[in-house]
Every structure is written in C-alpha cells, then in structure tokens.
Amino acid sequence: MKQHSVRRIVLPGVICALLLAAASGYSMAFNGGRLVEPMDFSTYVFRAGDLPMLLALALTVCYVGYLVVLLVGYTLSSRHRQASASTARAVNPRLGLLGLLGFLGFLGFWTYQTDGSIFPFVFFLFFGFFGFFFEGKLSGTLMDERYRENQLRARTTANRVALTIIFLAVLLLGQGKIMGNLELTLVAFVIVVVLALALELFLSSYLLYRYDHDEPAARDGE
Amino acid sequence: MPEFECRLKKYRQLKELTQEQLAAKVGVRRETIMRLEKAQYNPSLKLAIDISRAVGAPIEEIFLFPETSEKEEQGGDG
C-alpha cells in the first residue's frame, strides 16, 4: 500500500481518536461523565454539554463507514486487477502453514462439552489454507489460455466435490437422528459444512497445480 | 484428451524456433507449446491462428483432426 494511502487511512483515525479522548475528558471534567460512563438511554435528555461527545462519536461512526467503503473498494479493484492480470498472483507458499490453525477446530469438542459453545469448529475452515502451499508454487506463472482453462476446471471440480458433500450431509443429517439428539445433529452438520468449505478452498489450488503439472515438462525437439 | 495429430514441432523446427521463442511470440507458456506438440492440448481458435502465423503454415496443416486426415487421403487418392 502506498504511503499516501496509509496516511489517508491513519490520519483521520488518529484525529478521531484524539477528538474522542478530548470529548471524553471534557465530559468527565465538566459534564458529569455523561455518554462516557454507563447510563440509561431510555431517559436520556439532550444537554448542550453533550455536544462535544456526540460530535466525536458521529465523526468516529463516519470514519468507520469510510473504512468500510475503502475496504469494499479495495476488494473490488483487487478482484478486477486479478481478473485482468497476465500472471498469477504472488503468494508465499509458507502461508500454507496457516492451515495448521485448522487443528484449533478440535477445541470445539472440548468447548462443546464444557459450555456448549461450538464456535471453535469454524477454525476447521483454516484447513483450506493448506492450498496456499500449491498456489505459492504457481506464483507469477503466466496465465495463458491453458492455465485459465485449468483454473476453471479446478474450481468447478472443487465446487462439485464440496456441494456433493454438503448435499449428502443435508440428506443424511437432515433426518436429525444422530444418537437421537437434534443438537448433536446440528453440531455434526456445522462440522461437515465447514470441512466441505475448507476442502473446496484447498482443492481449488491443489487441482490447479495438479492439472498444470500432471506430466513432467520435457524439452524436446530443441 | 484431444484426438488430433499435431505437426507443430515440424513447422517450428523448419522456422528454427525454440519452444520458448514460439511461446513468447504467441503469448503462452513453453509448457503449453510442449503439450500442443504432443497433441495433449486442444488450443483455442485464436491461439491456433497465432501459431499458424508464427510458424508460417496453414492451421489445417498444423492441426490434423481425424476427419481432415480422411478427406486429405480421399483427395490424394482421387
């Protein structure tokens, strides 16, 4: 990211933080801590002394909105750049190590036993990041028509596999009869869907690599 | 797997081009040229035309599909 872009993002954030801090200080010193300390908003009545805090909050909300707009714009433009790029994006194969975070998903079995929380199962999604290992190997490859064809083929196959797994899970788990317990069935369903999505992420990269390297490249006739 | 005969290697060598040079000329990777020569990849019409121009030979002489071959044989006999 360019330096002026960073300044465009950080500077308003710093200003907002400073204004918020100043407004909080003012409120604590001269306005009885209103809008800073917890208060009952059902009986809230506007006072002129609330203005600095309200303005600082409004600016902060605007800043957050600005960040969201920037993020969406950046995502859309990077997709467009990727679509029109002539070489595959540069990815460090070591990012594939992020796939190890997928093992955190097993914590879900423990948290489900202790407090009924199933959120850690979502970490299984990180298994899909093992695909970065293969994507990294294709970094900077010229995306000619064979590459794009293989990419499409890999994505289609990965999507088909993931959808088949989810379809089967819906058919089998939809009966809600794992150990006669509906809650366990839903937990199993979450796990299967997350793993299917991870598999889809992984297969897209892995199959592209396989299709691209399914035969040893030999120089002949030269 | 595409079922056709590819004579690209012959025409490329006649033009004294390496796989790399031809690949650079038509904007693809060397691996793509290699697979084309082994008839393991069915190119798009645009790529076929670009290759035909690069090696200076008609498309139908570089890529021979079964029907084309049969017709040629029939024409040769007659």
Image: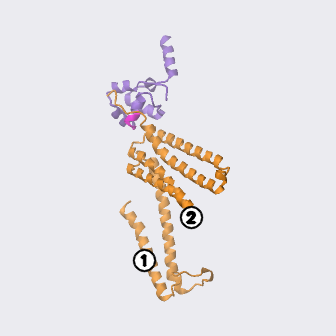
Q: Tell me the chain of label 2.
A: A
Q: Is residue A97 magenta?
A: no
Residue range of the region highlighted in magenta in the rendering: B27-32
Q: Position of residue B9 (x, y in %)?
A: 37, 26
Q: Tell me the chain of label 1.
A: A
Q: Residue at x 52, y 75 (%)?
A: A58
Q: Residue at x 54, y 86 (%)?
A: A48
Check disc 2 and give the amino acid type.
Asp
Q: Position of residue B34 (x, y in %)?
A: 39, 31
Q: Position of residue A104 (x, y in %)?
A: 48, 56
| Chain A shade in the render | orange
Check disc 1 and give the amino acid type.
Leu
* Contact? badges 1 and 2 (CB < 8 Å): no
Q: Residue at x 49, y 84 (%)?
A: A27
In this rendering, does residue A88 appear at all?
no
Q: Secondary structure at mark 1?
A: helix
In this rendering, the answer to whether B76 lies above or below B52 is: above
Nearer to us in this view, A200 or B12: A200
Which residue is denoted by mark 1 in the rendering?
A18
- Local crowd at mark 2 within 10 Å, few (<14), some, or many (≥20)? few
Q: Position of residue A194 (x, y in %)?
A: 55, 52
Which residue is denoted by mark 2 in the rendering?
A115
Q: Secondary structure at mark 2?
A: helix
The number of numbered discs placed on residues in the rendered structure image is 2
